Amino acid sequence: MSLAVLCDFDHTITAEDATDALLEQYALPEWMEVEDAWKKGHIGSRACMQQQIDLLRATPAQVDALADSIHIDPHFKSFAAVCAKNNVPLIIASDGLDYVIKYVLKRHGLSHLHVIASHLAHVKEDRWELSSPFANAGCSSQQSTCKCAISRQMRTLTNSGKILYVGDGRSDYCVSAEEADFILAKDSLLAYCQQQELPHQPFTSFSEASVLLLNYIEQHDLVFPPLTKEEIYA
C-alpha cells in the first residue's frame, strides 16, 4: 500500500488567495457580484471563475507583479522535500489559476511540482481567457478543477493506495468527504472535518504538516516503491 498527497494552493500553501488578490487589483467591480452569486449557491465554481476572468483587465507584466507579491508558507519547500525523499507523489490540485500558481512556485524553486488547475491564457493586451481542462461534468461541486476525479486517478496510480489531502476551504469539502483517506486541515476545512467527523489532523504550518505526514506513513506501515516522473504525472 502506498500514498499520494494532493494539496490545495490558495490559503493552504500561500498566505493569501492569489486569485482574489488578482481580481481585487485588476478586475472590473462586477467581479464581486459574481463572487456573491457563487457564495449564495446560485452558480458553480467553474462558472464563477470564468465570469470573473472575463472581467479581468491586466497586462502580463501586471499579473507577474501581482504574483511576485504572493507569499508561501516558509516550510512548504521542506514538506515537498519530505514527500520526494519518501517517494510520495505530491500534486498541487487547485481551483485557482495555473499561470499564477506556476509563477509563484518557480519563484521559490519549486517549478518541478506538478500543478493541476484552471488554465489562464493571455489573449491580447489586458485580456485573458480561462479554460477548465480538469473539470468533470459529473462534479457535484461544479468546480473548475474536479479534485475528486484527480484523487481517483492518483489512487489508481498508487495501486489502490491512500490519498492524503491538504487544504483549507470550501473547494476542498467534496474531495475531503468523498475521496481522501486522511486530511490535514485548517480554517473552514478544519471546521467541516470536525462537523462531518472525517479522519483529519489540524495544522497551521507546513512544519507541522511534515511531522503529521511522517507519522501517518509510520502508523500505516506504508511502502513506497520509487515512481518515475512520467508515472507520477501521466
Image (spheres, helix red, strand yellow):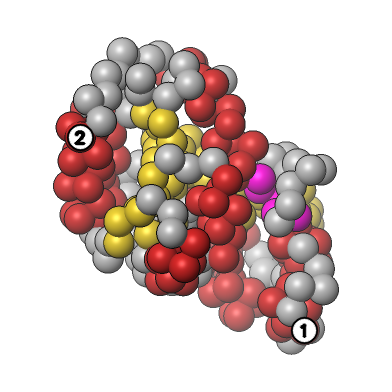
State yes or no: residue 221 in magenta: no
Predominant SS along the magenta part:
loop
Q: Quadrant of residue 146?
A: top right
- Which segment did they paint magenta? 142-146
Relative vertical location of residue 62 with respect to residue 40 in this rendering, above or below: above
Q: Position of residue 196 (x, y in %)?
A: 49, 62
Residue under the image location 42 percent in, 24 percent down: 161
Q: Secondary structure at mark 2?
A: helix
Relative to 36, is 99 on the left or the right? left
The image quadrant where one finds the C terminus is top right
User: In front: 74, or 135?
Assistant: 135
Q: Secondary structure at mark 1?
A: helix
Residue under the image location 81 percent in, 68 percent down: 43
Identify the residue under disc 1. Answer: 33
State yes or no: residue 144 in magenta: yes
Name the kind of residue labelled 1 in the image. Glu
Relative to 216, is 27 on the left or the right? right
Relative to 75, is 35 on the left or the right? right
Q: Quadrant of residue 197?
A: bottom left
Q: Position of residue 132 (x, y in %)?
A: 74, 46
